[in-house]
Amino acid sequence: MTEISSLLEKLSNAHGISGREGSVRDIVREELSGLVDDVRTDVLGNLIGTRHGDRPSIMVEAHMDEIGLMVKYVDENGFLRFIRIGGWFDQTLLNQRVIIHAPTGAITGVIGCKPPHVMKEEDRKKVIEATDMFIDIGCQSDKDARELGIVPGLPITIDRNFATLKGDRVTGKAFDNRAGIVMMIEALKRTKSKSTIYCVGTVQEEVGLKGAKTSAYGLNPDLAIASDVTIPGDHPGIEKKDSPLEMGKGPVVTIADASGRGIIATPEVVSWLVETAKEFGIDIQLDAAEGGTTDGTAIHLTRSGIPTGVLSVATRYIHSPVEVLSLTDIDKGAELMARAMETAPKYFKV
């Protein structure tokens, strides 16, 4: 479990918004070294590690990007305005400390807004929208900011570090989807599969499942498993009818997400994962969700269709800087993925 925690910490503390995943990709490349026969980066930025073998060929993937921000412009007083990259709940952003990734180096800033002390009573009751927020980096003019290398288009990430909680619980930013990356890499370490394995770290999932589309098209695997996180219903503010999943109760096999508008997982793939879990005594949870989706949606619609499933880790407070998960769930998910890569020839004849 220590290795899982250490790798998750390294990946969580790394910074890589959609389209700017380079620092995360470097870590994944290093981890894949020695586990695959070759590693390459494609045109869009996906990292693809291949372990050559027999059919069926299996694509296991996890997206490398995190939600973040991007500099839009600097006003005359040196305050930065920004756009959101990915799906933010605006209340989460206010008063966060951030890092602007400038050519001159990392620049610290804080997200502010009009103080409540000078707001009208009705305005205090409203949610502050991101468009009314700004980033203060301590500059007094736009000239000061330009001298620091601040220009439109620079990526911005939340300044938050990994920390441990009670037991096997940990917290940090970007567990969506650095947890999926850890599960994928750990599975590759454990498996003795004779199949060809494509281990893919995809880009730009949070802004349209883009890397999954291009990498799956190029690889054209026989099967695919998307590794990601999903929402549990085991904390205040959410009911079991909204999500019956729980942290610490094992990895999650998706049946459908986004009420079927996302993926309706290939039944044969679901059976493969479920039966493999039974064979090796791995506790799992099944998920039929109304909201959210993963790279699996893009992969299973590629070319003439690719049989695809999704294996996830139940993670609290997704799309916030304080996501929480169970390391044991990652461990069990990696075990199931490793064993499934071994049992695939029994379930799929190609």
Image (cartoon, rainbow, N blue to C red):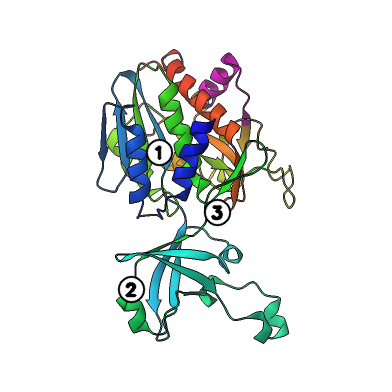
Q: Main secondary structure of the magenta part?
A: helix
User: Which label number is shown at residue 319?
Assistant: 3
Q: What residue sits 57% from the left and 66% below the top? A: 90
Quadrant in which the N terminus appears: top right
Say whether disc 2 or disc 1 marks the residue closer to the N-terminus: 2
Is 308 situated above or below 317?
A: above
* Numbered range of the magenta stretch: 269-285
Residue 58 drawn above or below residue 111: above
Crowding at mark 3 (Cα within 10 Å: few <14, some 14-19, many 20+): many
Q: Which residue is mark 2?
A: 148
Q: Position of residue 287 (x, y in %)?
A: 62, 36
Secondary structure found at label 2: loop
What is the CA distance from the residue labelled 2 to the residue labelled 1? Answer: 41 Å
Name the quadrant of the C terminus.
top left
> In this figure, which residue is indicated by the disc labeled 1?
299
Examine the rendered structure and indicate whether residue 279 appears above or below residue 208: above
